[in-house]
Amino acid sequence: MRGLLVADKDAVSRKRMANLLMDAGYDVAVTNSAAETIHDVLNNSAQVVLLGKELDELTSAELVPLLKQCNRNLVIILVADDAPLPLIRKVRKEGIFYHALRPAKAKDEEEIRQAVKYALERLKKTEALQITHYQ
């Protein structure tokens, strides 16, 4: 089972994202800890991470390269509406899959659902290519 992890220090945002994705039928874990996020990525229990602007004292710009070193196939969706442009540029360069704004209203939640859907499809294609490559 591909795992979704919502990693954000903002408790309200964490809960909202988790509920949104669980309502869409996904298995979701949540954390406000950078260490737990890294642990879940290393153990492959999280293959898609919805990452807030910061965790603990680390910004997403500091976390993304660490997470990608733990799992180069990890799909990261940055969910931040107030991130400065230099931070967004840096995380894009480091290999995030998508940058979404935090949904302000229920109608805005579709962007997150679609981003997760496409992230999981991409992950499935990547895994299929790797299996084909090793056969």
Image: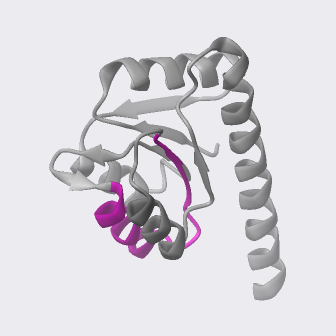
- The quarter holding residue 114 reads top right
Query: Would residue 25 be visible to someone looking at this image?
Result: no
Q: Nearer the viewer, residue 134 or 38?
A: 38
User: Was residue 64 drawn as part of the magenta stretch in this picture?
Assistant: yes
- The quarter holding residue 38 reads bottom left
Instruction: Classify 46 as above or below 107.
Output: below
- 46 with respect to 60 (left or right): right
Instruction: Classify 51 as above or below 8.
Output: below
Q: Nearer the viewer, residue 103 or 49?
A: 103
Q: Residue at x 31, y 21 (%)?
A: 11
Q: Position of residue 68 (x, y in %)?
A: 45, 70
Query: Would residue 56 be visible to someone looking at this image?
Result: yes
User: Which range is magenta?
Assistant: 60-80
Q: Residue at x 66, y 13 (%)?
A: 106
Count how many numbered circles sit on residues in the image. 0
Q: Position of residue 95 (x, y in %)?
A: 54, 71
Q: Position of residue 10 (x, y in %)?
A: 31, 28
Farthest residue, direction front: 85
Q: Position of residue 128 (x, y in %)?
A: 81, 69
- 55 with respect to 69 (left or right): left
User: Was residue 51 drawn as part of the magenta stretch in this picture?
Assistant: no
Q: Residue at x 66, y 34 (%)?
A: 112
Q: Nearer the viewer, residue 113 or 102?
A: 102
Screen quadrant of the C terminus: bottom right
Q: Residue at x 40, y 48 (%)?
A: 83
